[in-house]
Image: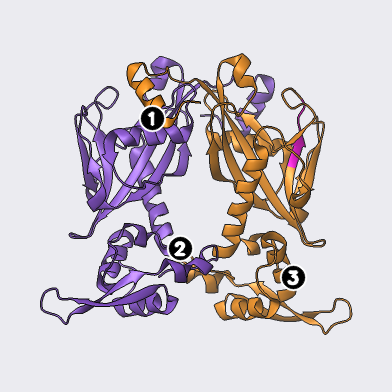
Chain colours: A orange, B purple
């Protein structure tokens, strides 16, 4: 393996020709099963070589005339039905040797990854024609095809970040929830991050939660108040830097 | 222009063939001229068609065997000498028709953009062999080649975000500075964002600034205290969500 400076000298003498690429999109789609406090990611089983029979993130190769986003929405529409799905770009993985087909096809495969968080209860998986599709608990994800474990890890970091800095949790929680539901949701995504009473104080102080006046009884404890996210109260803070927890 | 659903039906009948790509990297490199309170971006003048003679972000096409990052560092090393330059990936632009060469070359051009903030005083431009290179005030950037105005706008948003949520400012400010220097720096990047006394109170409360005991006289006012960023005091907060301003 030549060092960076040796490569540089070689480049001056004779630069390498340009690389040819196919471009793929791969989607890291997360949801939270609030009933069982599990963070889930959508995986499909590969139906062809390479990595036949291995799990991977749902993805496709970009076609002529198609934008990256259109390709990402296309593959998603084939796998899942969900209201108001919003995808955002995550990261681009494009190093040499990330796809074994590079050797035979004489072309490199670059992956632009996309990220989404969807409401678990609303999302309907479409198994039609694929050999496998599953909401996999993130903690139990096996070795994935290609570098998809790395893409997944990157997506998980982005999700944690969004939870810390934006009210994205309220997009996927039920309309009304107890403060304990909310705490469980954050703990499921972030791991241990705060004790409940600090979390409760912080969230109430932000002023974006409104007490519905309703209470719910679960198990043995006192009935718990049901809250709702107040988007109007949040509006003036929308573009301000803010920490949620 | 067919609608999304019409296209989908057409795809079922006969999917479009895969697109072929060349992959470029383009760098949005920012610095702040603290003496004159200007936010600057590094531009070079195109030496070939398309867009001959127009300003653009420094970029290159990825070569065989080269990673995206290596390509980004390669082009940068040809344009600028600076200590400890750290590039991070920004966003990938890959829609059809973003490069006029697509028509003749029958290949699409995708751009993976990278972002950096460097210390203005340390950065030495290398004009060698290019027809133009300049630190351009962001407020006065002209129409750039390709979609580079869009990449620049995206980079500027990332820079604002980093300033709000991380201590990146202290990487590029001088070792010691007055609170007014710091305020000017933030104002230069963010625009009007806070009044000085709120900013001052917030920053001192964070506890990461340490008073050096030194004072500096500038102009007519009272001598101002010189502060230093205390990386040790900041260390426990490094991976915690935090707002700086």
Q: Secondary structure at mark 3?
A: helix
Q: Residues within 10 Å of mark 1 (few under 14, many from 20)?
A: few
Q: Pointer 3 and pointer 2: residues touching (CB < 8 Å)?
A: no
Span colored in magenta: A43-47
Measured as percent of width and height from the top left, residue A173 is found at 70, 63
* Residue in the picture at 47% in, 27% down: B66
Q: Residue A204, relative to residue B244: is it above or below?
A: below
Q: Secondary structure at mark 2?
A: helix
Q: Main secondary structure of the magenta part?
A: strand
Q: Which residue is mark 2?
A: B165
Measured as percent of width and height from the top left, residue A161 is found at 57, 58
Chain under disc 1: A
How far is the residue under mark 1 from the one under mark 2? 35 Å
Which of these two is toward me, B48 or A73?
B48
* Residue in the picture at 60% in, 29% down: A98
Quadrant where the image shows the C terminus of chain A: bottom right
Q: Which residue is mark 1?
A: A5
* Residue in the picture at 73% in, 22% down: A49
Q: Which residue is mark 3?
A: A181
Q: Pointer 1 and pointer 3: residues touching (CB < 8 Å)?
A: no
Q: Does residue A210 show up?
A: no
Q: Residues within 10 Å of mark 2 (few under 14, many from 20)?
A: some
Which one is in front in this view, the residue at disc 1 or the one at disc 3?
A: 1
Report whether mark 1 lies on the same chain as mark 2.
no
Q: Residue B177, relative to residue B114: is it above or below?
A: below
Report whether mark 3 lies on the same chain as mark 2.
no
Would you say B197 lies left or right of A152 here? Answer: left
How far is the residue under mark 3 from the one under mark 2? 27 Å
Which one is in front in this view, the residue at disc 1 or the one at disc 2?
A: 1
Which of these two is toward me, B3 or A171?
A171
Would you say A138 lies left or right of B98 here? Answer: right
Q: Earlier in the sequence, mark 1 or mark 3?
A: 1
């Amino acid at each position: 393996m030549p060092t960076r400076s040796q490569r540089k000298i070689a480049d001056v003498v004779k630069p390498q020709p340009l690389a040819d690429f196919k471009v793929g999109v791969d989607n890291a789609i997360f949801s939270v099963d609030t009933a069982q406090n599990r963070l889930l990611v959508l995986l499909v089983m590969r139906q062809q070589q390479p990595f036949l029979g291995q799990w991977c993130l749902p993805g496709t190769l970009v076609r002529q005339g198609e934008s990256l986003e259109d390709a990402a929405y296309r593959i998603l529409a084939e796998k899942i039905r969900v209201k108001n799905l919003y995808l955002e770009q995550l990261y681009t993985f494009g190093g040499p040797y990330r796809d074994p087909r590079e050797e035979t096809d004489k072309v490199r495969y670059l992956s632009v990854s996309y990220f989404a968080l969807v409401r678990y209860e609303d999302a309907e998986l479409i198994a039609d024609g694929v050999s496998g599709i599953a909401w996999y608990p993130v903690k139990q994800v096996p070795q994935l095809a290609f570098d998809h474990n790395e893409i997944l890890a990157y997506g998980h970091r982005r999700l944690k970040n969004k939870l810390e800095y934006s009210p994205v949790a309220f997009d996927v929680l039920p309309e009304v929830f107890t403060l304990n539901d909310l705490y469980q949701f954050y703990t499921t995504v972030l791991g241990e991050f705060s004790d409940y009473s600090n979390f409760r104080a912080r969230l109430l102080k932000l002023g974006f939660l409104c007490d519905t006046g309703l209470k719910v009884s679960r198990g043995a404890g006192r009935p718990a108040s049901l809250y709702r996210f107040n988007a109007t109260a949040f509006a003036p803070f929308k573009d301000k830097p803010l920490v949620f927890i």
